[in-house]
Structures are given as structure tokens and as C-alpha cells.
Amino acid sequence: MKYLAFYTTDHFRDRQLAVSPAGVSKSAYVAQLLRSTGRPVEIVSPCWSKCGRWQAWPAADEPLGDGLTLHQLAAFGVPARWLTPLQWAFALWQVFWYLLRHTRAGEPVAAYHSYYLCLPLLLAKRLRKFRLVLEVEEIYQDIMSLPKPVRRWERAVIRQADAYIFSTAALGQAVQPGAKPTVVINGSYRCAAPADAAPFADGAVHCLYSGTFDPAKEGAYLAIRAAAYLPAAYCVHISGFGTPEQVQQVRQEIARVQQTAACRIVYEGFLDDDAYTALLQKCQIGLNTQTPDKGFSNTCFPSKILTYMAHGLRVVSAANEAITASGVGDLLTYYTAQTPQQIADAVRRVPLDGAQDPRARLQALDAQARRDLQAMLESLA
């Protein structure tokens, strides 16, 4: 089975491909779910390079084990950002040509929904008559300004899909798929391996914010400022990414708040996978403090919630429909106002003793997702 997604591995690190770490994690999980239905899965990745120079790489295959393979389409780098549309055009042409050559009528083909991929998917589906399973995380024209033709292509590819994998039930209601088969998968339900890292020995309750340092999203700043309302029995860790200017601003905000806060605030910076996993294993509470009042937030499920839960953390979050109606919605502790004091109050309310381990819920959701996906693919046969 073909699965079209923006995906890569360390094997292609030299290409410096443009991918989202959260997107790669979700795609890896969806590929494993598809494989669990008994079908070999080939991930077809059309990523382009961010290397910043003229350089070309051929298409290449990488066995991922257990019936999974990665087909990385050819890519090239450019020395200037204004040349990036050349990369897009080349990637989309390859997608169309690959689907034309390697699919057949009636075959199920899964594809991550991206406005970049709408046109080649539409054309290839029209010619080859494959059955499209569209993985929809968001409707792009609802959250950004797109050219009129791209908006039309996006509406068409969503309408013409034969089945859907939605990230939230609310998103499915927005699309209104009618009688077409649907599955809701909020993100990766895969639980982490047992902890290798020893917990912190200071006796404090350790809270973790991980994510963007973009001040417009506010998440890092609210987590830092919430520490001012927490007692010395708590410690807040700040991990994430941003521009050099954003990193400097976050560090300055930590220093400012720490001057008067009893709670210790630790700047962790951007961590690689192993270091991030070790930190998750040492913490007890995960903070999802990004401002949720954007127009699309009720159909968007933050992937960090499941990442926290997969390592056994309890989660503090703002409430929106996508989160509260999810399969883990009843396990979170919510705050009602997007203020540091409200967040701190929610942190203190988190039940740490005798509470349900979120990993048990994730295991149940994983099993349900496998059953639902199996039934969906059988209905398309």
C-alpha cells in the first residue's frame, strides 16, 4: 500500500529535508497502523531540501523493517529562497508521475492532506482511479490565505476522497464526509519504552513545557510566568525552538521571572530525541499552554499532549472542543482563562497519587485505531 507523506529518517540527514518533527512522528505511526492491517506499506516522501546551495540527490529507497519501506523522491537544493518554487514544482511533478506509474484502479492509496499535494493527487486519481484515503489534519484555506486555484483544488481533493483519517472528530464534522468511511486518530497513541532515566532526586514536582518559542503563540511565556504563582515544591522546565531572537527573549523572560519566583525555572533549549525522551521520563506534568483562541483551534489537536501522555505525564491544558471530545479528554486538567495564575492553579490541582496512568488509555486507543482502520480498508475493497 502506498502512503504519501512528508517523511524522512536519519539516513537522509545530509539532504536537510523540510519536515515537521511532529508530522514525521504522526506519519510513522499511521504507517505502522496501515502495516498492522496486513499490507506492506511504502511511504512515498516528496520533501524538498533546505540545504541552501545547489546540490541534487536521486530518488532512493530505505527498508524500515517489518514490511515498511521509504521511497524518498529525488530532491535538489537551491541557494536562495526565491528559487524554492522550483523545488515545489519538481516535487509535485514527481508525485504525479510516481502515482501514474505505480498505482492501479481500485487500489487504496493513503495520502497526508497538504495544499501542496492537491493538484497531483487530483490528476493522478482521475487517471488511475485508485481509492484515496485522505489523512486530514487541517483545512488549510480556513487558517491561511491561499490563491484561488489552490483553494479550489483543496476543496476538490477533500470532496473526492473515498475515505478519511481525521485528527479530530470536530474536523470530520466540518468536512461532512456523508456516508464515506472515516477514522479519527488524534496522533500517535504509541507508548514510550519503560524509563531509562532516573527521576530527579530533589523531591519537587517537575513540569515541562515543550514547543515553539514564538511569542505570538504565547505558550512558552505563559508557562514561564505561571512559575511565579507556584511554590518551591515545583520546578518548570522550558524546552523548544525558535529564531535566535526568540530564544534570547525566552531566556530573558526566565531570568526576569526567576528573580521573584520561589519555583525554579530551568531553560533546556532545543533537545535531540534522546535528551528530550530522558527529560520527559523525569517529569510528572506536561504543559500545553499555547493560546487556543485562533479560528482553527477547535479542530486542531496538539500533538504534544499525546507525547506527554506516552511517557506517563499528566497534562495541563486550555480547553477546546478538539481536546475535550478526544479519547483522552477526560484525563487532562484544564484551566478556564489564559492567564499565568489560572495555569498555576491548574498545575496544583493535578492528581499525582492514585490517578489513572494515561498510558493505559493510549494502549486502548491504539487497539481501537487498528480495528477501525482495518474495517475502513476492507470497506474500500
Image: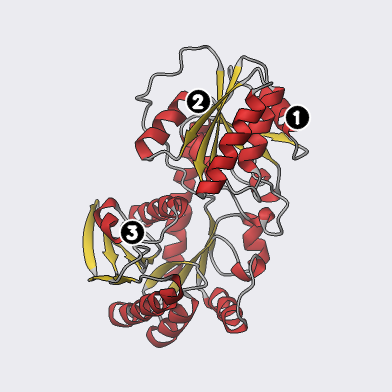
Which of the marked residues, 3 or 2, is nearer the chain's N terminus? 3
Vertical relation: 290 (above or below) 262:
below
Point out residue 41 in the picture as x, y percentages from the top left corner.
31, 61
Residue nearer the viewer, 270 or 194: 270
Q: Type of residue at label 2?
A: Cys
Of circles 3 and 2, the one toward us is 3
Q: Distance between the residues labelled 3 and 2?
A: 31 Å
Residue drawn at (50%, 12%) of the image: 202
Point out residue 123 in the picture as x, y percentages from the top left corner.
44, 85
Position of 345 with respect to 14 (left or right) is right
Position of 242 with respect to 120 (left or right) is right
Q: Name the residue under label 1.
A: 341
Q: Type of residue at label 3?
A: Gln
Q: Name the residue under label 2.
A: 283
Split into 4 quadrants, where in the image is the C terminus? bottom left
Split into 4 quadrants, where in the image is the N terminus? bottom left
The 10 Å Cα crowd at callout 2, few under 14, some 14 to 19, many 20 or more, is many
Residue drawn at (45%, 44%) of the image: 367
Asked whether residue 192 is in view, the answer is: no
Residue drawn at (78%, 39%) of the image: 337
Q: Mark 3 points at which residue?
A: 16
Residue nearer the viewer, 62 or 322: 62
Q: Is mark 2 on a helix, strand or loop?
A: loop
Quarter where residue 299 is shown: bottom right
Do residues under tags 3 and 1 come within 8 Å of each other at their CB atoms?
no
Q: Is mark 3 on a helix, strand or loop?
A: loop
